[in-house]
Amino acid sequence: MTAAAQTLILFGATGDLSQRMLLPSLFGLHADGLVPDDLLILGTARSDEDDAAFRDLAGQALAKAVTGDRRALIPGFLDRLRYVPLDLHDARSFAGLATALGDRARRPLAAFLSTAPALFRPAIGGLAAHGLAGDNARLALEKPLGHDLASSQAINDAVAAAFPEDRIFRIDHYLGKETVQNLIALRFANSLFEPLWNAGGIDHVQISVAETVGLEGRVGFYDDAGALRDMVQNHMLQLLALVAMEPPARFDAAAVRDEKVKVLRSLRPIDAASAPGDSVIGQYRAGAIGGQAVAGYADELGRPSATETFVAIRAHVDNWRWRGVPFYLRTGKRLPDRRTEIVIQFRGVPHSIFEGQPLKPNKLVILLQPDENIRLLVMAKQPGLGGEGIVLREIPLDIALRDAFAGARRRIAYERLLLDLIEGDPTLFVRRDEVEAQWRWIDAIRAGWAAARMTPALYPAGSWGPPAAMALAERNGAMWHG
């Protein structure tokens, strides 16, 4: 078993992600006694601060995130923190990091790069040059990992020059969500679903990631990325892979990731010929969210743009299990609800004995956010003694995780991932061949859009995207859920 890290180095420790997610997550692990007592958290960033200033910044971040009796544990957590100023553009500044680590440099350590991808190469070079990339070290990378296959390969090559694949932890924070892990449990710990989890039992699958927000300060990044690269390439394809993968032989990193990459390599390419029929792109214009008027994307950006803020795709996994089953992917900004969900639409009964009664096929709805919930929609008899016989109605069987596991604290997804990084378990992290399979599929779609001269259709903020997105599903007799 891999030895637990005794030191965690946080690059970009004073940044937004660190303050909103990483430090509160590490505090949660500390408060629950899940990390080693001697774990040192060493923050680095360009700003010229000291231990006291970093602890003060962390304390302010935790004051916003921690409530109740757990606040009393904050001082003990802050004692774990140290800070070393480090300019990633200056290789000499890594000497100060190595000096601060002292003997810890030879013990198990983990580094978390929460920086711009352009800084990955100098960060890795500095770690390697100062003896901090040896067999005792592992490295976590925050996305985005490139903007296409070529740039992703360049990043991965730079990382691989210092760290072997089994010590590289590529983060997709969706994989840290409890409900995503529950999808694995639901499929492979219950005999009820797996016999139906194929083209014989499932009509189609929907995966939706809907956001109500607009640019929210991500102007430069988002306009270069768009919805396809920002959401579909990573989060949504990982969810698709978990839904569609074959049962792994065991729950370990190699077996799980082997099955996911098989799915990603089986995705039917979408090219210039199929892109107009299998995808819809849109961009929000002015509208209203929650009764409040909001500006259009071009107005927020300050100039016209051809970047898509909405995308809907009909995907197919060309293998035996999923032959003929469409996977509908939908994501966008300025949509009516904030919602991330997976909908498994089962096939209808082959023959109905209830003459004149409309039967709805069963649905399994896995809600990831804003709440975590598993709902199975089934047909049941409506109570009553009327002479019309059995009257059927669709009813939900809910498993609200908050209720089913009352007393369990709802964790930030990064808690799971940071704990696995510290302990050296890569199962919920993304392997290089997964990332590259995802990019190959995405790059082909973008090339197809360009060749077909597709441009985003405008949709009003507060709507569910362009009307063509509805038609994308309806052409196959499906309807978007919700």
Image (cartoon, rainbow, N blue to C red):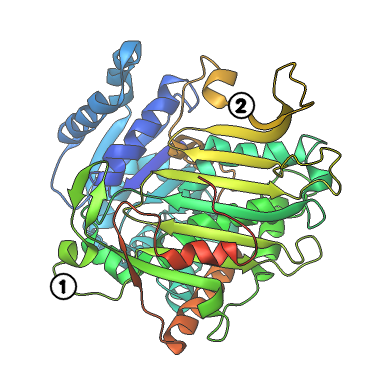
| Residue furthest to the front | 387
Q: Secondary structure at mark 1?
A: loop
Q: Are marks 1 and 2 in contact (CB under 8 Å)?
A: no
Residue at (36, 52) in percent of width and height: 335
- Local packing at callout 2 (Cα closer than 10 Å; few below 14, some 14-19, many 20+) is some
User: Which disc, if any, is residue 303?
Assistant: 1
Q: Position of residue 187 (x, y in %)?
A: 73, 41
Per the image, the residue denoted by label 2 is 399
Q: Answer yes or no: is residue 71 visible.
A: yes
- In the rendered image, residue 119, in percent from the top left (x then y), is placed at 31, 64
The part of the image, by quadrant, that contains residue 7 is top left
**Near-viewer residue (232 or 384):** 384
Mark 1 or mark 2, earlier in chain: 1
Return the residue found at the far bottom.
Answer: 451
- Identify which amino acid the numbered label 1 is placed on: Arg
In the shown orientation, is residue 199 left or right of residue 345? Answer: right
